[in-house]
């Protein structure tokens, strides 16, 4: 027994479970996996996983990756860490100003050193 | 350089220099570039003259530095606005309520001071996020769960102080109720500890909430009376197994009995997971295509019930869940089925026992990790660009508390649907009744924020009217964005606003210079009340 509207609402809205639509929560949709990279550490990849991966990581239930997939329709990878066309200034400006529902990050959250490491990691293919 | 209202540039410069001598010059922010992230990202006043903007931000490292900053601010009459992680999105974010305030950014205070596995409690600082606390418990291998709201990057303290809610066992998903003991820095820089913490060398600060004498912790909920620098919380001893089942009922009016049964189960401790009610015929508003032929929210009940019967879907469902030992939760699910089987046509699905914690491959098949106290950010798919909707610039939420009865739900949705239509509110999401807190539901009416001042202005006008209409019918907001905090406080008006006048009396006594969070939740210090009148 399924009902599209109810399943979708509960999935995105209450973030509880598919149970409301009549199935147990262990059934049904694909879910997200946890980052496999340690979230401590100062490398660009580690800092990216610490602050960005929840939204811009791999798999479904990643609002950032999902939004970029819709935006670019396959012209560029939906995952930021697979892009080769980013430049550091753009990454830094986006983090410090925010975009759409992503709020800006303060220096008390992501320091300049950490942000530079993220930008370097996301532009590593260009170097 | 911006200055706080009523403060000269030279006095402000002097205060900033003294703040820098306390926290270090790297942690005093005054440039437009550094203050940009302190704007409310979801402000319904974006780029308008009334947008709430900070004049500076100061980021202390510990409670002693908070004390020193407060002493300077109190002496110089500098308005300050404490934030924990600044992620109160939709309700103000990192921006002050009073423009020109100095944001006291507590994010650097991110220590998990003490965690006690045997008594299941923790003492944290304001900068600790749900992700931080979850990872700490995982790294230490402790047999504990947290309860988290949808966005995992929020502050454990900040969310509790703003009365946030979560998704696990009812003792823990009311985050303010789950706290135990506070450390608070007052406007004059004095520090106090509540509950057992008022006793030097207390051995039970995080075990006994009440200590001795009047219970003052509530003064610091949604408050402008102090800066909370430490707070204790009761954590959930990890349950062995989890069961979720679904009860379906065929008729609209069956909700009356169904809510009563769920309430009975919850209030007799037979079911302590969060009940999740759903109905395909509620006036939703998410931009998701409905199945062809499905009656709309305003179709006749007969048509809706006929559609539900023909398509073998219940009119209402409630997902019920249980945490504990396998023998206990299996019996609780059987008991639930017996109690609900008195509703004609009731159906029951689910009920499989899942060992806790869920394994990574089990989580992959699940819609959400929240019922297991695992923080995430997947909720931000609401408002982000999707196949069904353009990206928004955030949201504001009208969030009335409604009674925990079927009749209460029905009446509230009828009123909301009628009012949303009449006022043309730009609703992006209207939730089912959410049972995160015992004894009531909350309904979230989310509206998109844009960067178009004219559209935002129309939304503000309609939002204020909605708040008033809901209040006229006895439904109060539990929390709101700064642009509406005075409007909501005005609805709590019993006996000529006796509660607000009491808040003002307390405010003037505890913070006589009115320097902390002026205007927050509609409470203004004396000098600004006089100015407004």
Image (tube, coloured by chain):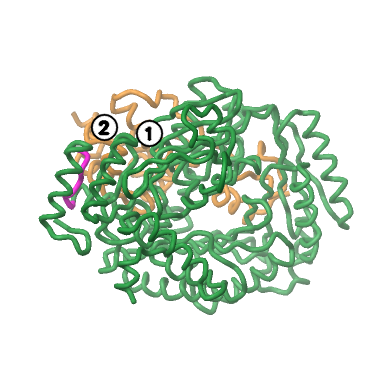
Chain colours: A orange, B green
Pinpoint residue B315: horizontal percent, then vertical percent.
Answer: 75, 60
Q: Residues within 10 Å of mark 1 (few under 14, many from 20)?
A: many
Disc number placed over residue B219 in the picture, else none: none
Residues at circles 2 and 1 in contact by the CB criterion of under 8 Å: no
Is label 2 in a helix, a strand or a loop? Answer: helix
Residue B231 is one of the magenta-drawn residues: no
Q: Is residue B295 left or right of residue B518?
A: right
Crowd class of label 2 (few under 14; some 14 to 19; many from 20; radius 10 Å)? some
Element type at mark 1: loop
- Comparing A49 with B356, the one in front is B356
The C terminus of chain B sits in image quarter: bottom left
Residue at 37% in and 57% down: B42
Residue carrying label 1: B110
Q: Which residues are magenta?
A: B26-32
Image coordinates for residue B32, horizontal then vertical, percent: 18, 52
What label sits on residue A114 in the rendered view?
2
User: If the image is split into quadrants, where does the N terminus of chain B sit?
Assistant: bottom left
Q: Nearer the viewer, residue A24 or B402?
A: B402
Q: Position of residue A27 (x, y in %)?
A: 67, 38
B382 relative to A90, above or below = below
Near-viewer residue (B126 or A63): B126
Residue at horizontal 63%, vertical 44%? A17
Image vertical order of residue B100 relative to residue B529, above or below = above
x and y percentages locating residue B419 in the rendered image: 56, 76
Residue B41 in view here: no
């Amino acid at each position: 027994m399924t009902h599209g509207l109810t399943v979708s609402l509960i999935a995105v809205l209450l973030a509880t479970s598919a149970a409301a639509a009549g199935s147990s929560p262990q059934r049904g949709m694909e879910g997200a996996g946890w980052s496999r990279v340690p979230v401590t550490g100062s490398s660009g990849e580690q800092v990216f996983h610490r602050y960005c991966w929840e939204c811009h990581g791999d798999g479904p239930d990643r609002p950032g990756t999902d939004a970029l997939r819709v935006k670019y329709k396959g012209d560029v990878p939906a995952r930021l860490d697979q892009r080769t066309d980013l430049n550091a200034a753009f990454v830094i400006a986006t983090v410090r100003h925010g975009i759409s529902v992503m709020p800006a990050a303060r220096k008390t959250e992501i320091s300049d050193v950490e942000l530079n490491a993220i930008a370097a990691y996301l532009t590593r293919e260009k170097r | 350089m911006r200055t706080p209202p009523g403060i000269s540039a030279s006095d402000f410069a002097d205060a900033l220099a003294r703040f820098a001598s306390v926290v270090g010059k790297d942690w005093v922010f005054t440039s437009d570039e550094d203050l940009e992230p302190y704007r409310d990202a979801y402000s319904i006043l974006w780029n308008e003259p009334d947008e709430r903007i900070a004049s500076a931000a100061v980021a202390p490292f510990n409670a002693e530095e908070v004390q020193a900053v407060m002493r300077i601010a109190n002496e110089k009459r500098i308005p300050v606005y404490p934030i924990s992680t600044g992620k109160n999105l939709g309700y103000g974010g990192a921006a002050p309520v009073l423009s020109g305030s100095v944001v006291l950014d507590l994010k650097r205070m991110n220590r998990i001071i003490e965690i006690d596995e045997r008594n299941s409690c923790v003492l944290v600082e304001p900068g600790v996020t749900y992700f931080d606390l979850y990872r700490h418990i995982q790294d230490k291998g402790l047999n504990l769960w947290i309860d988290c709201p949808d966005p995992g990057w929020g502050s454990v303290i900040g969310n509790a102080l703003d009365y946030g809610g979560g998704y696990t066992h009812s003792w823990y998903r009311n985050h303010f109720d789950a706290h135990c003991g506070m450390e608070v820095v007052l406007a004059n820089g004095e520090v106090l500890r509540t509950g057992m913490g008022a006793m030097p060398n207390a051995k039970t600060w995080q075990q006994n909430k009440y200590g001795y004498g009047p219970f003052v912790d509530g003064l610091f909920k949604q408050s402008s009376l102090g800066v909370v620098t430490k707070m204790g919380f009761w954590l959930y001893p990890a349950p062995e197994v989890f069961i979720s089942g679904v009860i379906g009922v065929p008729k609209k009016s069956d909700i009356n009995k169904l809510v009563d049964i769920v309430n009975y189960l919850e209030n007799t401790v037979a079911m302590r997971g969060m009940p999740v009610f759903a109905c395909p015929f509620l006036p939703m508003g998410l931009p998701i295509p409905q199945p062809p032929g499905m009656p709309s929210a305003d179709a006749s009940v007969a048509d809706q019930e006929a559609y539900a019967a023909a398509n073998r879907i219940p009119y209402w469902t409630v997902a019920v869940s249980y945490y504990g030992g396998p023998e206990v939760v299996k019996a609780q699910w059987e008991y639930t089925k017996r109690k609900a089987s008195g509703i004609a046509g009731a159906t029951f699905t689910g009920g499989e026992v899942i060992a806790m914690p869920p394994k990574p491959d089990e989580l992959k098949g699940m819609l959400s990790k929240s019922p297991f106290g695992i923080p995430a950010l997947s909720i931000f798919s609401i408002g982000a660009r999707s196949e069904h909707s353009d990206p928004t610039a955030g949201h504001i939420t009208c969030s009335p508390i409604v009674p925990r009865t079927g009749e209460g739900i029905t009446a509230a949705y009828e009123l909301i649907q009628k009012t949303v239509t009449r006022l043309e509110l730009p609703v992006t999401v209207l939730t089912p009744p959410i049972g995160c807190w015992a004894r009531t539901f909350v309904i979230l009416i989310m509206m998109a924020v844009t960067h178009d001042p004219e559209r935002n202005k129309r939304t503000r006008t309609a939002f204020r009217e909605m708040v008033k209409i809901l209040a006229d019918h006895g439904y109060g907001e539990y929390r709101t964005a700064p642009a509406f905090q005075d409007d909501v406080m005005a609805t709590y008006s019993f006996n000529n606003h006796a509660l607000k006048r009491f808040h003002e009396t307390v405010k003037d006594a505890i913070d006589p210079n009115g320097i902390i969070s002026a205007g927050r939740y509609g409470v203004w210090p004396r000098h600004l009340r006089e100015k407004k009148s």
